[in-house]
Structures are given as C-alpha cells and as structure tokens.
Image (spheres, grey):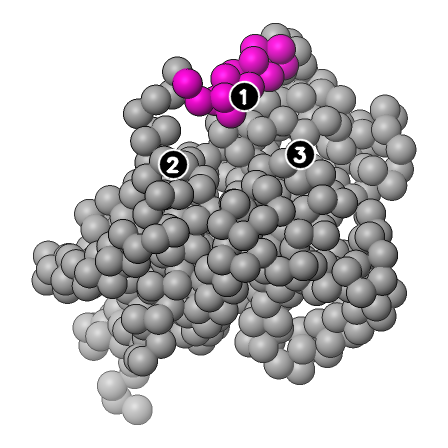
Amino acid sequence: MNLLFPGMALGVGIFLYFRYPILYLGFTWWLWFLTPFVRRLSDYRSSYTDPSPILLAPFLVTLVSSITFWKSLPKVASQGGLPYIFSVAAIGYGFFVGLIYRPPVTVCLALLDWLAPLLFGFHLFTNWRNYPSYRQNIQRIFLWGVLVMGIYGVVQFLIAPEWDKYWLVQAEFSSGGKPEPLQLNVWSTMASNRPFSTVMMAGLLLLLVNPNKGTLGIPSTAAGYLSFLLAKKRTTWGSWFLGLFILTGSLKSNTQIRLLVTILVTVLCVVPLTTLEPFSTILSSRFESLSNIEEDNSAAARQEAYSLALNDALNSFLGSGIGGPSFDSGILSILLDLGWLGTIFYLSGILLLLFSLFQWSAIRTDKFASAARSIVFATFVQLPLGLPHIGEQGMILWGFLSLGMAAQKYSQFQRDSQKQFFLPVETYDIDYEK
C-alpha cells in the first residue's frame, strides 16, 4: 500500500490532467482530504511507518499541474502571472540555500510543501477561461467534502476509532487530544486539526453562497459546523468570523439579505446540537478559554517560542533555507527559511494578488468570487499564528486566491467582448461603396 497508493494516484492524476481536466481538480482535492485517513488505516493494519510514502500521493498529483507552469512560462508575465514568478523564485532560492545546510531529502520534502499549492493555484489562474466550470466543480467538491469530513469528524469524537487512537499514540500528536472517546481534538480524515479546521472554514463559507446545495445543505451544514467546533482551533474560529464579515460586506444589498437568512437557518441548525451533551460541556470550556488568555497554557508556550526565535528571524537576511525547524508562526518560519531577501519576493507575490483581488469592484456580482476572496483573507491572516502558506492550508490559500484572480480575468474578458460587440458602426473600417 505504501508504494502502490502514491504510484497509482500519480498515474490517475496524469491521465485526468490530459483527458478530463475538470475531474483532475476534483481528484486532487479529494486526495488532500482523504489521504491521511488512508495512511492511518494502512498503518493500523500493518505497522506505523514514518515518514509514510502514502502521504506523497496528494503532492505528486498536485505537481502534475507544473506542466501548466512550464508551458506558460514564456508568456506568464504578459498574462498577469508575474506575482507567481516572484513567489516561485523565492521558494527556489530557499531550496538551494537549504541544500547547503540540510539533508537533501529533508529539503526536497519541504519543497513539496511550499511549491505544490502554488503551482496548483497557477494552474487555476492560467485556465481562467474555464472559470464557470471550475466554480461549479469546486462548489460540488466542497459540499460533499464538508458532509463527509464533517460526519466522520463527529464520529471520530464520539467513539475514537482504533486506527485514529493508534496513530495518535505512535505519532505523539499532542495537539490531537487524548486517545479516548470525547477527548479528541477532531481532525477527521486529515492529518491534524489545524489544516482540517482551515479546510472546513473554506467549505462552510462556500456553503453560504452555494445555490445548488439541495437536500445535502442541512446535513452538510450541521455536521460541518459541529466538527469545525470540535476541532477546537480558536484561530480558525476567528478567521471564519472575519471571512463572514468580508463576505457579507462584498455582496449587493439584495444578496446580503438572502445571505443573512441563510446564516439564520445555519444558526438554527447548529446551536441546538452544541447544547446537547457531550458537546456542550466540551465546547463551553473551550469558549471560556477565549476570555482567559492569561491562563491559556498553549498561548503561553507559543509566546515563549516566539520570543526565542524572533531575534534570529529579524536578523536573518539570507535565511537558512527551507526544511528547517517548524514554528507555529508563518511569519517567523518564512523569515528564518527565506531570510529577508526571499521573504520580500515571496510575500510580494501574495500581496500583489491580494491587492488586485480587493481592487476588483465587479466582484459584488459573483457570489463565489466574493466567497473566494473572503476565504483567502481569512486564511492569510492566520500567518502570525500558523502556517497557512504550505501543505493543505496552502492549497486553500493559493487555490482560492487563484480562483478569485481567474474570476477577475473572466469578468474582464466578458466586458471586453461586450464592448467589441456593441462598438458604433463608425469605428469599423468598412468600405460602404463595396
């Protein structure tokens, strides 16, 4: 399984990329959703393997999209993709510096974490002409993703399946809680509760504007929000509120009213569930910790780690390369890995795309694009307290950032087409005598 799963996934990914591009997107997202779960089942039936080759599957399939980058490289600047070049160059710089200080395998694995989400995002951006089908496909993927991962997350919390307990003990994953029923910090089918909560945050915001939820809307909403709360990641809770605020403010007034009605229905579905035992006791204690930061051990440990690394990060001009010790702060990690030189280029790429996205006024007419922008901002603001730029979280950041840019280019193309169609007769070079 360790060898066949990533190999077969790569083969399917290459086939879908060339023959069925839309299905390639869905296959890639589902691998990110489910591969850690496959790994835990495999380890439970055989033996714990670390590092697990199974976890390479989503990275390998995502990197198939590098074909798009390679084909588009000669004209990427003229297509508005220069910010991607900035970020890719910064990652390349961090890679070569890392080879000087660290083992090649460690640096190559880190390169997958950094580069795969960015290349996948560039693939979405470059194929902006397919934006309408991408929009429909992504909404369907995350509707089912929230449903499946949400239901399993609740089941995981209630019964603590043996394969999850086995992996929790073997991996010494302390932030996952205790290997007992009602004591887990839910991570569902993913590798940890932070990326799971970030993916669920994106999916739940998309649910608010999905016009094709149908009968799956209510169960997806109920299971999704409950498992999202049971992940117990307060940073992501705050990001969801921020994303909701941005989403509401970016829509037209009549759409805002419908969104508020949707939020009210969501509250009516979720609140009764959170008042039931055993959920109410667990969640209430976590909510109380929001107002007792002084007594929060995790916040104190994070603050101590920051104070130790901050001086090194601020004085890191060249950086020590990617693949170094991981800090629970994207800002510190980027500075330590890329140095000021690489950080300026890497963050410039992201900020240029963000600035362009927030400058687009016509976004109010596209609810999906508004949701994508809110998801991007809600993910990016986690940078001081997490690693939203790499791995699963990086897929959310770069994926939805690029979808928003694709929506912008598609909208501009439609407006230009209409202008050309309705040009005055006098502007055409017509020989009236002929």
Residue extent of the magenta highlight: 295-309
Mark identifier at residue 302:
1
Amino acid on which the number 2 mark rests in the picture: Arg
Magenta stretch: includes residue 72 = no
Magenta stretch: includes residue 297 = yes
Amino acid on which the number 1 mark rests in the picture: Arg
Amino acid on which the number 3 mark rests in the picture: Ala
Residue for badge 3 = 90
The residues tagged by marks 3 and 1 sit, at their Cα atoms, a distance apart of: 27 Å
Residue for badge 2 = 286
First in sequence, mark 1 or 2: give its number: 2
Element assignment for label 3: helix
| Quadrant assignment, res 330 | top right
| Residue located at (49% from left, 58% from top) | 158
Q: Position of residue 129 (x, y in %)?
A: 46, 70
Badge nearest the viewer, 1 or 2: 2
Q: Position of residue 17 (x, y in %)?
A: 67, 74
